[in-house]
Image: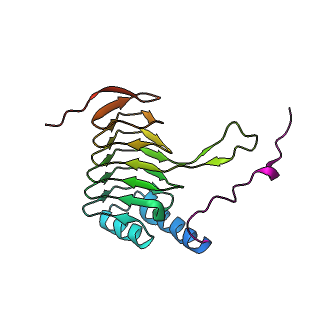
């Protein structure tokens, strides 16, 4: 079995969007006020996210134990709900529209690695959740995906391709189940 020469692994192209001091300050803030389940104060979390460069609309609710990688890559519209233990692994831009619901333990996973490359080079692409999107508990959206208006990703499902507007998706990979009808 041959060994991979990791000295060839080069992600120098990747820019974390902030200097070491800001990233360290966010790491501590995230641990104390977001990941920590003992902080139920959503308003404080919204103010801290804005302080670190996130663009957050009005009426946003952020429940306990939420993990956000880089707030400066995050935009959230109005009246969106982020449930317990949601993980936003936003190595690139994440845009969440208005009136969205990210249920418990949903994950937005931007980073992946190129399995075709011997050095597993990092690959990142933005995620967009348009208005009215609902991500079910323990669901996952991967980098480069747009969940269009009013789409739903069911519990434990994985979206690795775009979701059409006004449809419900389920499974791994997520497939279209039926049209969403809002009354």
Q: Quadrant of residue 65?
A: bottom left
Q: Is residue 76 magenta?
A: no
Along the viewing direction, whichever of 163 and 153 lies nearer the viewer: 163
State which region is magenta: 1-19
Q: Position of residue 29 (x, y in %)?
A: 48, 68
Q: Quadrant of residue 19?
A: bottom right
Q: Quadrant of the N terminus?
A: top right
User: Is there any visible trace of residue 85 in the rendered image?
Assistant: no
Which residue occupies the extreme right position in the image? Answer: 2
Along the viewing direction, whichever of 100 and 150 lies nearer the viewer: 150
**In the image, what residue occupies the spot 33% across and 60% down?**
40
**In the image, what residue occupies the spot 44% across and 36% down?**
159
Q: Determine whether 151 is above or below 14 in the image.
A: above
**In the image, what residue occupies the spot 46% across and 63% down?**
71
Left or right: 10 as drawn, with respect to 29: right
Q: How many marks?
A: 0
**In the image, what residue occupies the spot 47% across and 61% down?**
73
Q: Determine whether 168 is above or below 150 in the image.
A: above
Q: Position of residue 154 (x, y in %)?
A: 35, 33
User: Is there any visible trace of residue 72 in the rendered image?
Assistant: yes
Q: Quadrant of residue 163?
A: top left
């Amino acid at each position: 079995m041959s060994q991979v020469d990791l000295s060839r692994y080069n992600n120098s192209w990747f820019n974390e969007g902030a200097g070491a001091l800001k990233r360290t300050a966010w790491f501590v803030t995230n641990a104390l006020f977001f990941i920590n389940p003992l902080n139920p104060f959503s308003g404080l979390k919204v103010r801290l996210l804005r302080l670190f460069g996130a663009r957050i609309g009005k009426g946003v609710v952020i429940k306990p134990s939420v993990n956000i990688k880089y707030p400066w890559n995050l935009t959230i519209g109005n009246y969106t709900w982020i449930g317990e233990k949601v993980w936003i692994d936003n190595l690139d831009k994440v845009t969440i529209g208005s009136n969205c619901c990210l249920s418990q333990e949903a994950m937005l996973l931007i980073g992946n690695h190129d399995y075709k490359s011997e050095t597993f080079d990092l690959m990142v692409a933005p995620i967009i959740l348009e208005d009215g999107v609902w991500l079910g508990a323990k669901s996952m959206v991967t980098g480069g995906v747009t969940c269009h208006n009013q789409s739903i990703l069911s519990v434990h499902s994985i979206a690795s391709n775009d979701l059409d507007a006004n449809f419900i998706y389920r499974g791994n990979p997520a497939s279209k189940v039926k049209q969403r009808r809002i009354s």
